[in-house]
Image: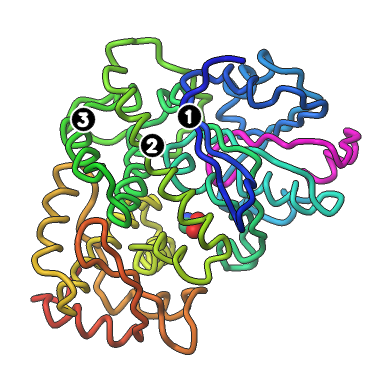
Amino acid sequence: MQDMGKSIDIIIGGKVVGRVVGGSRVGEVAALLEGEQEVFVVYDRQAVWVAEAVGRAVAVRGSLALTVSEAAKSMDTVLSICRWLLESGASRKALVVAIGGGITTDMAGFAASIYKRGIRYANLPTTLLAQVDAAVGGKTGVNFDAYKNMLGVIVQPVFTFLCAEVLRTLPRRDFLSGAAELVKTFLIEDHDGHYARSVRLLAARDVPGCFPLAPGAPSSPSADTAERVPSTDSDQHVDEKEWQELVFAAAAVKAGVVGRDPFERGERRKLNLGHTFAHAIEHEARLRGDDITHGEAVAMGINLAARLSDGLGLAQGLAGRLMRDFAAAGLPVACPYPLETLAGAMGRDKKAEGGRVHFVLLRGVGDVVIIDLTVEEALRTLQGGAADKRL
Ligand code: GLY
């Protein structure tokens, strides 16, 4: 058995249903797959080198490459994965290993969860965003008609392998998008000063090879279509260990929340900090043809949530602090759209109930509270403090 990094169990109802494991190299996944007879790999073709490395480390019965996009996150793709499993002879003992970002892990996990009434799946996320959020916690699914993630199930992966090596290939902008979710997690639960550590490292740009550009240089494009290969420049990885610790710590916070509330009846809603605003910002961006990543929208959304918290008297001066921290960390702060344009999309939030939205608000770093408000109440409070009604 190779020396794996840290591991944390996901415990639901007193039973271990999965785990999150940290590691350095892709090949270490072999230790997690020991004894598996039928491993089927579903991977994002941009992460082909990761799939190949898995193929060298373990006997794989079959591999399926996906061309991944929001538009292709559909039932059709899930059915094509199911058809491929069937044609490849996958039995109920098969294990699907999903390799890619959140779209890939969502679709492969969904396909596994319905194939033959459910077979097991595991995740090897290749983006920071998926490592700290999407690939942990068992949410799977696809978009349906105009609605994001409208069809799906919550089924826990048997493991999520957080491999440091795969992040070396991540473009800077994608890295920052994931960093927003990481920082969000520590705003929800902050042990050992993880929030401040993340901000400090981001501000120093002391991050692994996924930060190939000099500080202040323009971001690299997020939608790169070229296959990515790992960087070998060891100078770029000076703080990889520290990042690995932070990534694992964020995933561990999420694993704890999910264990206590797997189906999002209460506490898990906290993980949506900033997301009610973020989804509305992303919706508006799509309408206008603007390029805003999920993480960028989340960073803007968290700042709006902090302003709303200040406005409701839950916190004092928090919005100013977060704005300074986020700006130093290279995360976007200001939403480019007027408040009013976000109202419709916020009201249609699929988590809204009886005209009220569960707003996740902040009393301080590591201290969140869920308050149900109408969109009008929230916007009125925000506008009270916004001189020109722009966010
Ligand atoms: N992305 C939030 C959750 O998994 O609950």
From which residue to which does the magenta span run? 80-104
The reply to whether dot 2 and dot 1 touch (C-beta < 8 Å) is yes
Residue 188: horizontal and vertical position, in percent?
32, 57
Asked if residue 385 is positioned above or below residue 289 in the image, the reply reads: below
- Along the horizontal axis of the image, is 369 left or right of 333? right
Determine which of the numbered discs, if any, sits on residue 247 in the image: 2
Instruction: Check disc 1 and give the amino acid type.
Output: Gly
Q: Residue at x 33, y 63 (%)?
A: 274
Q: Is residue 329 above or below residue 348?
A: above
Res. 361 in view: yes
Q: Residue at x 24, y 62 (%)?
A: 336
Name the side, left or right, on which 275 lies relative to 268.
Answer: left
Looking at the image, residue 244 lies above or below residue 278: above
Q: CA distance from mark 2 to mark 1?
A: 9 Å
- Asked if residue 355 lies left or right of residue 310, the reply is right
Residue 100 shown in magenta: yes
Q: CA distance from mark 3 to mark 2?
A: 16 Å
- Neighbours of disc 1 within 10 Å: few (<14), some (14-19), many (20+): many
Nearest the camera: 215 or 128?
128
Please say if the residues under marks 3 and 1 sit with CB atoms less than 8 Å apart: no
Give the mark nearest the N terminus, 2 or 1.
1
Distance from the alpha carbon under mark 3 to that under mark 1:
22 Å
* Residue 37 screen position, x and y as percent: 82, 26
The residue lying at 26 percent from left, 81 percent from top is 379
Residue 288 visible in rendering: no
Q: What residue is shown with label 3?
A: 205
> Counting residues from the N terminus, which is met first, the one under dot 3 or under dot 1?
1
Residue type, numbered disc 2:
Val
Tell me, for residue 22, which label it has, or none.
1
Q: How is the image coloured?
A: rainbow
Kind of residue at disc 3: Arg
